[in-house]
Image: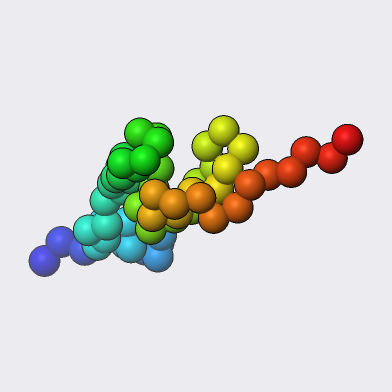
Amino acid sequence: MPNPKRKTSKTRRDKRRTHYKAEAKTFAICPTTGESHLPHRAYWHEGKLYFKGKVVMEREIAA
């Protein structure tokens, strides 16, 4: 029976065995602002923090 000449490294072995594939992130579009954002995350738009289409916080500008 043929045998390998060299030991297969752990990294090489694990790379071959993996079935994980990187996927592009999906974005949601806010019905209020029309801004695209990650789903279930708050996001900033024009100085206001939105979550579920509602203003949660406004950014104050220090003078």
Left or right position of 47 against 4: right
Estimate the x, y position of residue 56 in percent, counting from the top left: 54, 55
Q: Is residue 49 left or right of residue 62?
A: left
In the displayed structure, does residue 18 sit left or right of residue 59? left
The front one of 37 and 2 is: 37
Query: Which is nearer the eye, 9 or 5?
Result: 9
Q: Does residue 36 lie above or below 1 as drawn?
A: above
Task: Report if residue 12 is visible in the image.
Answer: no
Q: How many marks?
A: 0
Residue at the image point whose x is 38% and y is 55% from the top? 52
Could you say where residue 22 lies in the image, as x and y percent from the top left? Answer: 31, 48
Whether residue 13 sits left or right of residue 2 in the image: it is right
Quadrant location of the C terminus? top right
Q: Quadrant of residue 36?
A: top left
Task: Give the residue displayed 62% in from the left and 38% down from the top.
Answer: 47
Q: Nearer the viewer, residue 53 or 27?
A: 53
Residue at screen point 78% across, 38% down: 61
Where does residue 43 sit, x and y in percent of width and height? 50, 46
Query: Can residue 61 be seen in this snapshot?
Result: yes
Taking the spot 15% from the left edge, 61% from the top edge, the residue there is 2
Residue that extends furthest to the right in the rendered view of this protein: 63
Above or below for 10 versus 36: below
The coloring applied to the image is rainbow
The N terminus - image quarter: bottom left
